[in-house]
Amino acid sequence: NDIKEIPLTKPVDITASTRFRVDDGRADADLTLTAAVPDFNINDVRMETSISHNSRTERINIRNFSLGSASMNLLLKAAGMMELKNETLSDSDLKISLEQKSPELKSIYGPWFTSGGIKIEAAIKGDLEKGKAAGRIIFNDFHLKNDEEKLSLESLNMDFPFEYSFAAD
């Protein structure tokens, strides 16, 4: 695919700041990136991350990862550690969350509008054979509407906890 095929009529603005350091088997990286792509209604995407990798311990530490947009009231966050001593994940302690909240009905894609809040929180511990994932899916006065499809959901409130064991029983 060619970049000329992307239907852009307005200027795209991307700003990045990086810091990278390698020393004695350890790599540290920090990145901040902001972007605005007005043709796709993306006006204020921001990503920040701070990660280190220790090749001797085969461990990755995610001190911070966030990706979000204030105008879309959307935020993805992650932090924790992963060990890669096997072909797959040998150990982990990760926390991940995705949150979208809007006090007013707002278009999220085409004819789809939402308001209220939705949050998914998860924690993953251990390896992919015996580890566990646990968390919650929370809806707080959540509304969903699509007039073209004549679909709507009014005021959903729910706090759904979940737990999943990777072990095969």
Image (spheres, grey):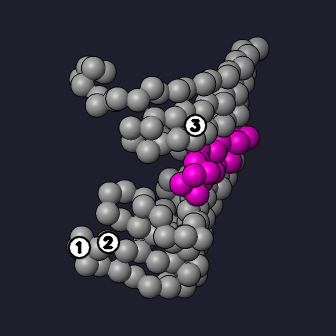
The dot on residue 149 is 1
The reply to whether discs 1 and 2 touch (Cβ–Cβ < 8 Å) is: yes
The dot on residue 146 is 2
| Mark closest to the chain's N terminus, 3 or 2 | 3
Q: Is residue 133 above or below residue 153?
A: above
Which contiguous range is marked in magenta?
60-79
> Disc 1 residue type?
Glu
Was residue 108 drawn as part of the magenta stretch in this picture?
Answer: no
| Mark closest to the chain's N terminus, 1 or 3 | 3
Circle 3 crowding by C-alpha within 10 Å: few under 14, some 14–19, many from 20: some
Percent position (x, y) of residue 8? 34, 29
Q: Could you tell me which secondary element the residue under label 1 belongs to?
A: loop
**What residue sits 62% from the left and 24% below the top?**
16
Percent position (x, y) of residue 92? 63, 49
> Disc 3 residue type?
Leu
Q: Quadrant of residue 15?
A: top right
Q: Could you tell me which secondary element the residue under label 2 belongs to?
A: strand
Q: Quadrant of the N terminus?
A: top left
Side (left or right) of 149 relative to 133: left
Was residue 67 drawn as part of the magenta stretch in this picture?
Answer: yes
